[in-house]
Amino acid sequence: MKPRKIPLRKCVACQEMKPKKELIRIVRTPDDQVLIDLTGKKAGRGAYLCGKLSCFQLAKKTKAFDRALKQQVDAAIYDQLEQDFIAVEEQFLAGKELADDEAE
Ligand SMILES: [Zn+2]
């Protein structure tokens, strides 16, 4: 059996390459909103982040989204995203466990 190719993406905070499903996607939509995209399918320029709050906080500190999304992101938006990130983190981890169960 050929090993399946796993698409890797780089976390904008810690720069580690990880499988896409282990990363949370942040997207800049065509109308310039910056959102967390749990589906990974929203249109727009995306940036990837490990599903860890520590990586989010690092990204916030270094303004990694400004670079990754090629747009200046207000501190207020980082704050909003941080709250959203905390809210989705549990959902994200739960979803990942679910996916792992299915794979077995
Ligand atoms: Zn990371």
Image (cartoon, rainbow, N blue to C red):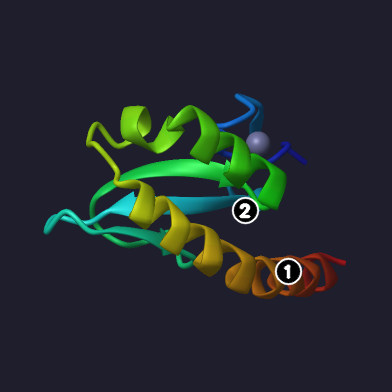
Circle 2 packing at 10 Å, graded few (<14), some (14-19), many (20+), is many
The reply, left or right, for residue 36 in relation to residue 51 is left
User: Which amino acid is tagged 1?
Assistant: Ala
Q: Quadrant of residue 3?
A: top right
Q: Residue at x 11, y 59 (%)?
A: 31
The reply, left or right, for residue 62 in relation to residue 28 is right
Which quadrant does the C terminus fall into?
Answer: bottom right
The image shows residue 67 at horizontal and vertical percentages of: 34, 27
**Considering the numbered disc 2 on the image, is that residue within a helix, a strand or a loop?**
helix
Q: Quadrant of ligand 1?
A: top right
What separation in Å lies between label 2 and label 1 (alpha carbons)? 9 Å
Q: Which mark is residue 99?
A: 1
The reply, left or right, for residue 57 in relation to residue 99 is left
Pick the front one: 56 or 74: 74
**Considering the numbered disc 1 on the image, is that residue within a helix, a strand or a loop?**
helix
- The answer to the question of whether label 2 and label 1 lie on touching residues, with beta carbons closer than 8 A, is yes
The reply, left or right, for residue 99 in relation to residue 44 is right
Furthest-front residue in view? 76
Q: Quadrant of residue 87?
A: bottom right
* Residue 97 visible in image: yes
User: Which amino acid is tagged 2?
Assistant: Lys
Label 2 sits on residue? 21
Q: Residue at x 46, y 57 (%)?
A: 79
The image shows residue 34 at horizontal and vertical percentages of: 30, 55
Q: Residue at x 60, y 24 (%)?
A: 15
Circle 1 packing at 10 Å, graded few (<14), some (14-19), many (20+), is few
Which quadrant does the N terminus fall into?
Answer: top right
